[in-house]
Image: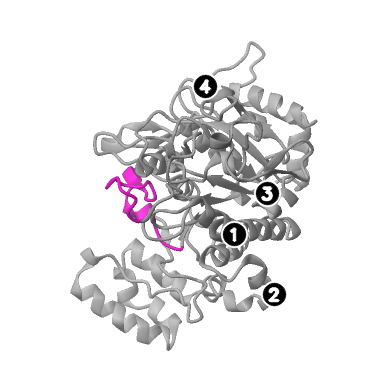
Amino acid sequence: MLNLTGKGSAHTCDGVSRRDFLQVGTLGAVGLTLAELKALEAAGTAPKDDDRAVIMIFNLGAPSQLDTWDMKPDAPAEIRGPFNPISTSAPGVQISEIFPQHARHADKFSLVRSCYHTAAAVHDTGHQMLQTGRLFTGGIETPHAGCVLGYLRGRKTDLPAHVVLPEKMGRTGGGMPHGQEAGFLGKAHDPFVLNADPSKPDFKVPDLLPPASIGEARLDRRRRLREIVDGTVASFEQSQDAKLLDSSFESAFRIITSKDARAAFDLAQEPQEVREKYGQNRFGQCCLMARRLIEAGVRFVTINTFLTVFDEITWDIHGTKPFTSIEGMRDIVAPMYDRAYGALLEDLADRGLLGKTLVCNLAEFGRTPRVNPAGGRDHWPQCWTMYFAGGGVQGGRVVGARDPIGGVPAERPVEPADVVATIFHSLGFDLESHLPGPAGRPVPLVDFGHREIHELF
């Protein structure tokens, strides 16, 4: 059902496809022609599509753009907030003083300061759109971008194609799906979810169980499987039981029995100084694990910075309990996040992985331009900032701009579907292709009118 060429593909009068024409324009901006890129690919020095990967860091709770990546130091105090801007390694680019590691690595990532959406200002809707490109309507759930990648390219190794760390998003107030599953592609393409905190001293990957619908008979076979795995795997692979396992259980079996797969999740193999460099906390160790998984062949890793906005310190800085104060963001969230992100970029670059791995830092919306009476900021989908590194992105750039008080885009407005299109573009997908949707109806990979943020590349 996959239409790789896509209907409506346009060509110029010289026979050049729209995609090639756009690519030539994009490459020209960085001093490469399409022919030169093809030469690099032929020489093996440019990443092939099958080698491309993504780490999606989703900042659940939504950072305040005015206190992080798009400060307004000349605005009145009730708008500019309590922090000062600092210079970065990217000429002319300033960010908040609470992110010194980001400032050090700003030449590796680029900011998009004009993101917005027009849906309800609740966390769940933003989670849906930023991870799938669409708002869920009519009971139809669009697949997460990582699930699309897994569907189109499959797994590379015994490891799953898409892994979610440390858990899927939990309750955020809207009671709606968050967009971290395979949706209409089917449960077979759901991500593998760690469901554990890798920073705990006794951390182990939880045992993998088949779906509940399999029933007691297969559960009994699974219990026997554990005994066989501890004995001779080869004899099991030839047994009748192995042939009866469904695809989900087969995936679990492959991870259980693969030394390489188990090793990828084993943070104890990392030197202690490396673990400390990332930070001995849940998010820091998830970032380290993401690097290990990408290195081991996982195609897409989604990291949820937080799991809920209730009763824990997060980006959700309304200023009153059960939410976070702006001081809590400064003292707890920012140092943890800044340290891990800096370590991840540095590690990927040092290991030669950054060029083929897109690292995107997303959020469901921004924060109100004016500080509220509690000293915090409330939900604001009208404009906010996200940023991208690696995967073909040129670092040190700023795309878009906002008005003087940071309320609405003033230049180059960017919607969630454009962000997802950017992820697919980095992976080498044809944005005019289709997926098999509900009832067999083709669904465009990207909705009409949305393209990648080409200024990043």
**Where does residue 124 sit, x and y in percent of width and height?**
35, 44
Residue 273: image tag: 2
Q: In the displayed structure, does residue 397 sit left or right of residue 203?
A: right
In the image, which is nearer the foreground, mark 2 or mark 4? Answer: 2
**Where does residue 145 sit, x and y in percent of width and height?**
46, 44
- The amino acid type found where label 3 is placed reads Glu
Find the magenta span and give its range.
166-189
Find the distance from the CA under tag 1 to the CA under tag 3. Answer: 31 Å
Residue that badge 4 annotates: 9
Q: Quadrant of the N terminus?
A: top left
Helix, strand or loop under label 2: helix
Residue at 65 percent of width and 72 percent of height? 276
Q: Are marks 2 and 4 in contact (CB under 8 Å)?
A: no
Residue that badge 1 annotates: 294
Q: In the displayed structure, does residue 128 sit left or right of residue 38?
A: left
Residue at 68 percent of width and 55 percent of height? 345
- The amino acid type found where label 1 is placed reads Ile
382 or 374, nearer to the observer = 374
Q: Main secondary structure of the magenta part?
A: loop
Residue 413 appears in the picture as rendered? yes
Residue at 62 percent of width and 28 percent of height? 400
Find the distance from the CA under tag 3 to the CA under tag 4. Answer: 46 Å
Residue that badge 3 annotates: 97
399 or 207, nearer to the observer = 399
In the image, which is nearer the foreground, mark 3 or mark 4? Answer: 3
Find the distance from the CA under tag 2 to the CA under tag 3. Answer: 26 Å
Find the distance from the CA under tag 2 to the CA under tag 4. Answer: 51 Å
Q: Earlier in the sequence, mark 3 or mark 4?
A: 4
